[in-house]
Image (cartoon, rainbow, N blue to C red):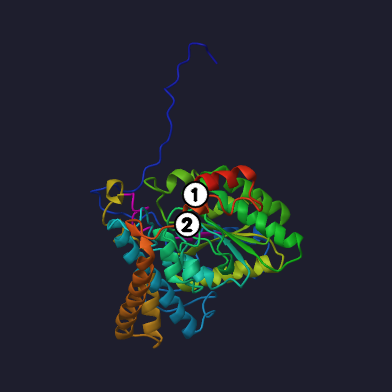
Amino acid sequence: MSDNETYAPLALNVPEPGCRPGDTPDFSYFEVPRAGAVARPPVDVDPDDMREMAFSIVRVLNKEGEAVGDWAGTLSPEELREGLRDMMLLRAFDARMLNAQRQGKTSFYMQHLGEEAVSCAFSRALKDGDMNFPTYRQAGLLIARDYPLVTMMNQIYSNADDPLHGRQLPIMYSSKEHGFFSISGNLGTQFVQAVGWAMASAISGDTKIAAGWIGDGSTAESDFHAAMVFASTYNAPVVLNIVNNQWAISTFQGIARGGVGTFAARGHGFGIASIRVDGNDYLAVNAVAKWAAERARLGLGPTLIEHVTYRAGGHSTSDDPSAYRSADEGAAWPLGDPIDRLKRHLIRIGEWSEERHSQAEAELMDQVITAQKEAEKVGTLGGGKGPSPRDMFEGVFEKMPPHLIRQRQEAGY
């Protein structure tokens, strides 16, 4: 090669979303497989024999509200009504807590709008004693297990009855009894924690499994890859969930996904069974979660699930999504609204009606408002009774060292 040969200047590829504010939303690139088209493999399938499932999407509900295909038929009408109630309750809870933040009653909140089926349906697939390692948008794991709304609100308000004594940001819940590990605000930690817990369960000869949760943006963190190596190497009894809601804070999912076609496809390099599911289809999420949980419980190893959904609201109350995406994009999302889809299915099979739905909406909102009044009697960010400053010194060491005892006494506690 001649020393005199010249080259064009080098350049980097910076992926761009399909539309920005002011643009017309276009999801023509997004392939939506026909409901029921993806077959259900045997639970003991070799990961190499299901590689194509990382590129398709498991769907059960079709446009007419029918449940079709191999993944259908795993839930009774009563279980479906309970699932609809869980999602409706979570949405009502979200609405009140979002307003509470705007009123200055708490410093921070994060909605689940459009993603309710992911956590609510998954929670119903686990058994008592299993442990979730969630991010900040899986409160449905608690809602579906009847965690008290008042206790959740006390944590959000950081009042005197906050079970975490003001030591966590609002919405970073924790409940061992409900299989909900303490939320970590650091991105990506949930995967390594879940794999480690699952390995410990196997080492101790237990039967409990773990579930890790991560957002699409956090798959770019090194913890994601470290967790995948350990899960694959040690055949950990864990279900690893990627919630692909299309957006990080202001960055679309193409940045973290890189050149690979799907997030689920990343599991191939680790020899992990990998599958994509319609995250707005309650029946599909629950069926895939049961399948993956059974694999883990039978000692057949980890499963990576990519939940394809859409974040309809802002990333948090600190975010303004109109600054980086079209205001109409959520309405154009081709997988629809999870609550509306399950409602239409129940109506189609004669187990629900528009009248019952309206009545349920009112009843659930009343339930949320009653809980909110009870929590606000204790206190909110704006006033009332807060956690004791004594809590700063408690719960850190099994036996409090002398210097902390002295500091606590100097502070008058």
Query: Is residue 149 shown above or below 210?
Result: below
Front residue of 410/166: it is 410
The residues colored magenta run 305-319
Q: Depth check: 61 or 134 in front?
A: 134
Q: Amino acid at mark 2?
A: Met
Measuring 26% from the left and 57% from the top, which residue is drawn there?
A: 328
Please identify the quarter of the rendering in which residue 1 is found.
top right
Percent x, y of residue 64: 37, 77
In terms of secondary structure, where does tag 1 sit? loop
**Identity, as a three-letter code, of the amino acid under mark 1:** Gly
Q: From the image, give the main secondary structure of the stretch colored magenta.
A: loop
**Residue closest to the eye, 315 or 32:** 315
How many numbered callouts?
2
The x, y position of residue 109, in whole percent, is 37, 56
Of all residues, the one furthest to the left in this rendering is 22
Residue 297 percent across, percent down from the top left: 68, 68
In the rendered view, tell whether residue 50 sits above or below residue 224: below
Residue 85 picture location, percent across and down: 41, 77
Q: CA distance from mark 1 to mark 2?
A: 29 Å
Circle on res. 412: 1
**Whether residue 44 is visible:** no
x 68%, y 50%: residue: 230
Q: Which residue is mark 2?
A: 172
- The answer to whether residue 217 is magenta is no
Q: Earlier in the sequence, mark 1 or mark 2?
A: 2
